[in-house]
Image: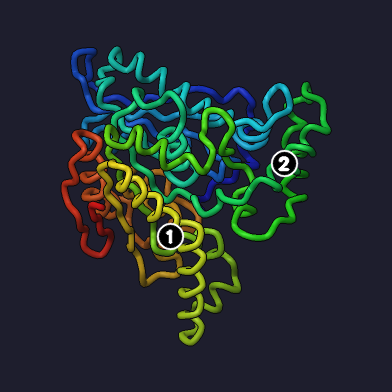
Amino acid sequence: MLGIHYSDVEQVESCQYLSFTIPAKATPESKLPVMVWYHGGSYKNGGCENLIYDREMLVREQNIIVVSVNYRLGILGLLRDREGNLANNAILDSIEGLRWVKENIQSFGGDPDNITIVGQSAGADVVRCIVIAEGTTDLYKKCILESPPIGTLHGREDMDLKSLAELNSYPLDVLTEELIPIQKSILSHVTEKGRPKEMVFAPHYGVYPLPEEKDVFSRMKKVSKDHPMLIGSNTREVMAYVGGEEKIHKMYGNPLLRPIIRIRAKKATDDIFRTPTRRFAEDYARSGGETYHYSLHWLENTLLGSCHGCELPLLFGPKGVGGRLEAEFAFTKEQLSEIGRPFRDIWAGFIRDGTIRSYHIEGMMDIERL
């Protein structure tokens, strides 16, 4: 989708680090707003240094600090603890990174009392988990969730336990280079139907630091009033996963079949992203939290449309755009930078003081307060 081939990237087990981008003139007295970014990648790939998350434009233009957090992925991040039980290591990593930022960001020119946690896709789910987790309420002020795949997170118990059982059949001290084949084996053995199989590795309700699923709303009621939220999704998310298939291209070229593709893409997008995200937003508002819900409807007349991840170049600029997304845009990098400016203004305004500067960007996005 983005022109990134993870098989060509070195795989490491020790990935727990932070990456800072700071305005050149920042001093410990600056007290700049802080954005803490959590990357996506279905909890099985990705990293905070991907060029699609290049932070220089956002930092230079908006005069904020951006800190990106890496966290363990796949079987290391979301399957087993030392005793062989289900674990939320990825979430614990993410919280520990946020705690370090809270304690140390003032030395970099940031305001420890004005931290906004932001994520996209699985990274948005990381943010959601931090919001409902135990012991995190003092670590941040606001949150932004872009396209959280909440529709994949229910009814996962059997799949999770079968995956854990396979991993537990290997010794605890298995070599790092053996982990990738083991993970591929676990992925290949998933036979479940329904949406959970779309994201095999994911956090577990009822496993520290997350509450049981039935207790999520009561947890919201305890924390939401202190943490404004901006949350939303794109109108054609799933086209990021199928839009590159040759048969889809051929079907889309047929005016009679084009509406069928759009209808099916809308249904899958609604099931995985839009409907459960809207429901979560409404629950957050109902629990007392100041909540803003956005809908991105950019590029509606193209094959991919407002697909999963298409807002990333609007937020971070075009430096890392590649793959099918670049082919679909048909913009120069300079044009894309200007197109994204109002989007960045809205996000940065919320990061600065929780204010939504605009509720509408013509041809791109609408926001409403719930």
Q: Can you tell which mark lies on residue 44? A: none
- Give the x, y percent position of residue 277: 41, 53
The reply to whether residue 362 is in sight is yes
Q: Which residue is mark 2?
A: 161
Please state which of residues 217 and 251 is positioned toward the viewer in this rendering.
217
- Give the x, y percent position of residue 92: 53, 26
Amino acid under disc 2: Leu
- Give the x, y percent position of residue 195: 59, 57
Q: In percent of the image, x 46 and y 56: which residue is there?
A: 273
In-image side of 275 versus 142 (left or right): right
* Element type where label 1 sits in the image: helix
Crowding near pointer 2: few (<14 within 10 Å), some, many (20+)? some
Mark 2 or mark 1: whose residue is earlier in sequence: 2
In-image side of 82 versus 204 (left or right): right
Q: Residue furthest bottom?
A: 256
In this view, 175 is above or below 149: above
In this view, 370 is above or below 92: below
Q: CA distance from mark 2 to mark 1?
A: 27 Å
Q: Which residue is mark 1?
A: 275
Q: Quadrant of residue 360?
A: bottom left
Q: In percent of the image, x 47 and y 21: which residue is there?
A: 96
In-image side of 247 versus 267 (left or right): right
The reply to whether residue 123 is in sight is no
* Element type where label 2 sits in the image: helix
In this view, 161 is above or below 30: below
- Give the x, y percent position of residue 242: 56, 64
